[in-house]
Amino acid sequence: MQLVTPDFGLLFWMLISFIIFIFLLKKYAWKPILKSIHERDENIEHALKAAEEARKEIEEIKKESERIRREVLIEREDIIDKAIHEKDRIIEAAKHQAKDEADKIFQETKQDIEHEKKQALMELKNQVATISIQIAETVLRKQMADKKEQERYINDLLKDINLN
């Protein structure tokens, strides 16, 4: 039972030992422990600040990326609109150019046809004139086989010419 109820001497030496232990702890261990706890607190606070800054940066990056995405979408729409307008303009220009060339070809063809028509008429007139002269020559030869007849015909022609 002595162990359960300690003596005054045991309590005295336990108290002295405890005081020496506290003194040694305070002199050699308490400052480094407090220093490490303080450093740990600072590190945790620094890490929290860094995490908050990282969160803010992530938010800013998200906002910036959203802004850039919107700008890219707008720019893409502008490029598509410009491409559509350019395509329409090129198509219209090609249509006008094709129409102009078709009109030019039509006019050239029309002129060629008119020219060919005039040449054909000229040729036809020349052939008709040649045939008419040949027919007239044949008729005149038959009718004017006689020399007197020829002189009379020439005189009639001369009179007609003088009158005109």
Image (spheres, grey):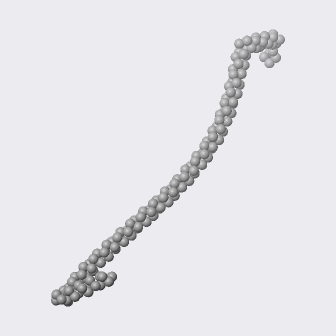
What residue is drawn where x is 73% and y is 12%? 27
Q: Position of residue 116 (x, y in %)?
A: 33, 71
Q: Position of residue 109 (x, y in %)?
A: 37, 68
Q: Nearer the viewer, residue 5 or 159?
A: 159
What residue is drawn where x is 26% and y is 86%? 156
The vertical placement of 140 against 76, above or below, is below
The residue lying furthest to the right in this view is 8
What residue is drawn where x is 70% and y is 27%? 45
Q: Position of residue 86 (x, y in %)?
A: 51, 54
Q: Position of residue 121 (x, y in %)?
A: 32, 76
What residue is drawn where x is 35% and y is 69%? 112
The vertical placement of 154 against 7, above or below, is below
In the displayed structure image, the side of residue 5 where residue 40 appears, left or right = left
In the displayed structure image, the side of residue 160 where residue 105 appears, left or right = right
> Which quadrant holds the C terminus?
bottom left
The vertical placement of 52 against 119, above or below, is above
Residue 6 showing in the rendered view: yes
Q: Nearer the viewer, residue 86 or 52?
A: 86
In the displayed structure image, the side of residue 72 where residue 40 appears, left or right = right
> Which quadrant holds the N terminus?
top right
In the displayed structure image, the side of residue 121 where residue 106 appears, left or right = right
Q: Nearer the viewer, residue 64 or 101?
A: 101
